[in-house]
Amino acid sequence: MNYSYAQMKKMQQEAFERVKEMQRRADLTARQAMQEMNAQKEPPLRIPDEPKRVKMPVEFPEKEEKISRPAGGDWLHRLTEMSDDERENALLLTLLSLLGSEGADKELLFALLYILG
């Protein structure tokens, strides 16, 4: 379609007017949203005048209780003493256990078993 210069100018002017109208509507909507947000603001929380105080215990324990370690012992120490092959096998077994419990694809589990063997 061939348009005359006057038709092109008229279409551009109409498009310009539509853009201005959309911008006016967007600004109006944004102002209304801001007014609603400002109206819904909750009052700031009141900070108490005095902080709550916790009384110190009168009797202190005589000895510090030892923190018990898990039944597995010091796993990090044992991990550093393992050879590279043992560490790889431990990692693969852990991965197999985790993936198996999550319902992973059987082919993936068999592939990991193959690597393990």
Image: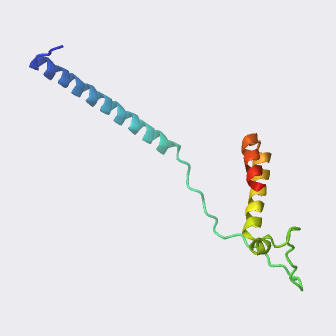
Q: Residue at x 80, y 52 (%)?
A: 97
In this orientation, does residue 51 appear? yes
**Is 10 drawn above or below residue 69 in the view shown?**
above
Q: Front-most of 42 and 105?
A: 105
Q: Residue at x 80, y 79 (%)?
A: 56
* Outermost residue to the left: 5
Q: Judge whether residue 105 can be spotted in this image.
A: no
Q: Which residue in the rendered view is the most extreme toward the bottom?
A: 62
- Of 57 and 87, nearer the camera is 87
Q: Is residue 24 left or right of residue 116?
A: left
Residue displayed at 59% across by 57% down:
45
Question: How far from the left and from the top, in percent, is residue 42?
Answer: 56, 49
Q: Residue 106 at what x, y percent from top left?
A: 76, 41
Question: Looking at the image, which is closer to me, 58 or 21?
Answer: 21
Q: Position of residue 89 (x, y in %)?
A: 77, 61
Q: 21 or 73: nearer the eye? A: 73
Residue at screen point 75% across, 71% down: 83
For the N terminus, give its image quadrant.
Answer: top left
Q: In which quadrant will I find the C terminus?
A: bottom right
